[in-house]
Amino acid sequence: MSEHKYQQTTQLESAIIDGVDISGEWNRMYVPREITDYDTQYLEEITALTGGESLGYCYQCAKCVGVCPVDNVGSYAPRKIFRKVQAGLNLIEDKDLWMCTTCMNCLRVCPKEVNMLEIMPSAREKAVLDGKTPDELQEMLRSVAEYGNPMGESARNRIKWMKKLNEKVRDLSKEDGSKPVDVLWHVSDYYAYHGRGNDAAKAMVRVFNKLGTDFGILGKEEKTDGDSQRLVGESGLFDELVRHNDALFQKYPHNRLVVTDPHALNAFKKHYPAITGNELKAEHYTQFLSEKLEEIKPLLKREFAKKVTFHDPCYLGRHNGEYDAPRNLINAIPGAEFVEMYRNKQGSYCCGGGGGGQWLGGTVDEHLSERLSDNRVREAVEVGAEVLIVCCPYEVSRFEDSVKATGNDGKLIVRDIIEILDYCMGED
């Protein structure tokens, strides 16, 4: 064979290229030029980033393709990204950078541990620094930087949902921090500012009070947890949010930090301590209430005679391993008939809101046959559910929009678990 037909490869570790196994010490391997005639400039650019290294580990087994929620309604998955970047795609400037919802399903099945939870934030951070972020994402980031929430709402309006609430709520921002509280409740942006989130926030207060919980909120001092901002590459903004929120957690003595948002749970448990050095006793509200199930059951006086199903949030389930707590609460609902969707627990389908997807509809939707939330609503209807139960603030509005978009208005309703518990505890 002529010498020019071969070239030295500099790929990492081991892989299969075009179905040909060329494992071994790559810096000493020679393979036919027609197999490796790729422009690896942009692959090397991603793998050189801190957190981006594992993209080079892909050996094209395609296990990720079958479980990727975006590929289910489009064309995506880490395997496909690797091939595109290997062939010369500049991911930093491409739409594919913003399609990933960081649902973690690919990492769950990947034998090489190609970790999109690290790859995407690293690559997106470079895009942010290079000024390559979508306009709708820039608007969200500006709102968070200026107002502390993605809606661009005034901090004073964070407690507006409490105005017509005839229930006791202790606002710690009006205190000096000298009096401890048992439960510090991080309310979250969507519970505080979104109309449907307000419904769930009020329900939470009523349930806490019926249980005699000693709880308090951060009021106008609370800011977004920052996990979504971290995942879209704004590490500097995330750092600011961490230091602001953690200072409040240290200021107001508490025994338990209860969160509404699974994304906040992920941030507080996994990422805040790495920056501040302070371990946080964070738990999702379903975990807190599940522990009090024996106290809750006698309070559930009203039946909820519906066929219900449950959507596992990615950041409560796959990311933090909690599948039982919400189901314990659902199974305690009087009169409810619980049926699982086909994709549940570890294999649950993503709603599309994670990884910044909540603010990237204009960028992402045009490349999909339907929204991920639409696909999930169809599945709930297919199993005969009358009610789709959720426990993430993003999901009520996302799924209610999808119920209308898929023509299932009147067939399926969407409720937060806390709304149903509150209903069953009600007397009027």
Image (tube, rainbow, N blue to C red):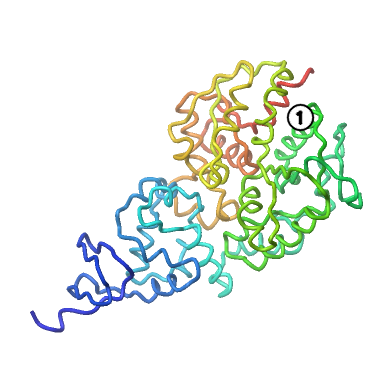
Kindly state the secondary structure of the residue where label 1 is placed: helix
Residue 153: percent from the left, percent from the top?
77, 54
Q: Nearer the viewer, residue 412 or 407?
A: 412
Q: Is residue 162 left or right of residue 53?
A: right
Q: The residue under label 1 is which amino acid type?
A: Val
Q: Nearer the viewer, residue 122 or 416?
A: 122
Q: Nearer the viewer, residue 173 or 148?
A: 173
State whether residue 162 is above or below residue 294.
below
Q: Residue at x 57, y 48 (%)?
A: 353
Count of all numbered marks drawn on residues in the image: 1
Q: Residue furthest bottom?
A: 3
Q: Residue at x 53, y 58 (%)?
A: 363
State the residue position of label 1.
Answer: 207
Residue 401 visible in the shown view: yes
For the C terminus, the quadrant is top right
Residue 236: percent from the left, percent from the top?
66, 68
Q: Residue at x 70, y 45 (%)?
A: 190
When asked about the image quadrant of residue 419, the answer is top right
Residue 361 visible in the shown view: no
Label 1, residues with CA under 10 Å away: few <14, some 14-19, many ≥20: many
Residue 21: percent from the left, percent from the top?
21, 62
When asked about the image quadrant of residue 16, the answer is bottom left
State whether residue 385 is above or below residue 169.
above
